[in-house]
Amino acid sequence: MALDLQSSRDLLIALGLVTGAGILGWLFKRYVHKRLKKIAAKTNWRGDDVVLEAVESSSLFWFILGGVYLALGRLTLSESLMETVQTVVVVLLILSVTVSLAKIAVGLLEMFAESNDAFPSTTMISNLVRIVIITVGALVVFQTLGISITPVLTALGVGGLAISLALKDTLSDLFAGLHILLSRKVVPGDLVELDTLHKGTVRNISWRNTIIQDRRNNTVVIPNSRLSTAIMRNFDMPVKQLIARVACGVSYDSDLEQVEQVVLEVANNVQSTVEGAISDYEPSMVFISFGESSIDFRVSMGAEHYSGQWAVTHEFIKQISKRFGEEGIEIPFPIRTVYQKNNV
């Protein structure tokens, strides 16, 4: 009778430890963790936000596992059963910590990529980091379960050779994607034009494909192996700024000094007032040829990015047409004079 009473008391203590650990974990998550997040939000470094966000979903689970582990010491179980339960608790803890570490590593990687233009951040890089950490966690679990890692690694090596032969094209795309990222040939956000005449903004480089969004908001999916060998124009490399050039012509009767003065006045006004133009850029104008019906010239103005050149060109054409009309400067229609000689 005394033995049953002691067993019941130990069982109640064990249940109390688990319940207390759960309540303590809930209080930690509800108050302490929430308070830590508010403090972290006020700091300049975003790494603490990443860490707290990653462990938020697992903190309560860790407290419960700790309570279960402590409760096992109050229970009268067989040695084999005790070892089994303890092993399960440790394995669950390792898996949970591995998942949290993967979230932290990916979050810090993305944070570093945002602050460092020389480092690419895409789905492929994030997934590779996540796979490496989870693989290490799985090997630790195997070691905890008493499974030798050496045969596992040998099997993975042989299996990896067979898989690499079967997935030759997929692996080709994978390594081509890594080459694109590490060589900085193109990064997400760049505006590119391929030799296939596909043109758009790179949205993501995954382990198999590169996603490009064109000007009609359609998605173009290009295998990485095709992209790595394509002839490509990158409008954002080495800088996003570019030169917008507008060609025009005036009649042969025009005063070219006046034309040059008017054109530069309009170009400077456009440069300083139009959104998308480089305000401190000094435009230039040069006469380029004697055309069939006009003296042709070309104006060069600076735009902050590719789409900005259209705003600059649009406004310049409007203003130069109006100003030429006010100044009496003619933009002639194409004219061709034909002399006909009759031999009688």
Image (cartoon, rainbow, N blue to C red):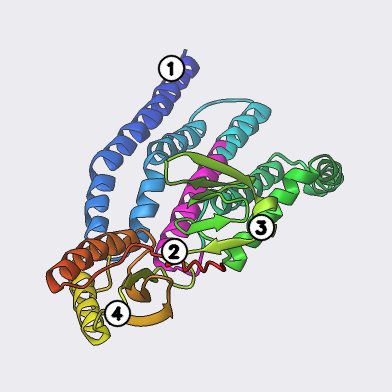
Q: Look at label 2 and name its amino acid.
A: Phe
Nearer the N terminus, badge 2 or badge 3? 2
- The residue indicated by pointer 1 is 5
Q: Residues within 10 Å of mark 1 (few under 14, many from 20)?
A: few
Q: Look at label 3 and name its amino acid.
A: Ala
Nearer the N terminus, badge 1 or badge 4? 1
- The residue indicated by pointer 4 is 283
- The residue indicated by pointer 2 is 112
CA distance separating discs 2 and 1: 59 Å
CA distance separating discs 2 and 3: 29 Å
Nearer the N terminus, badge 4 or badge 2? 2
Q: Secondary structure at mark 3?
A: loop
| Magenta range | 92-119
* Residue 318: % across, % down: 22, 61
- The residue indicated by pointer 3 is 230
CA distance separating discs 3 and 1: 79 Å
Find the residue positioned furthest to the front: 344
Q: Is residue 104 magenta?
A: yes
Above or below — where is 200 with respect to 315? Answer: above
CA distance separating discs 4 and 2: 38 Å
* Residue 275: % across, % down: 22, 63
Find the residue positioned furthest to the left: 326
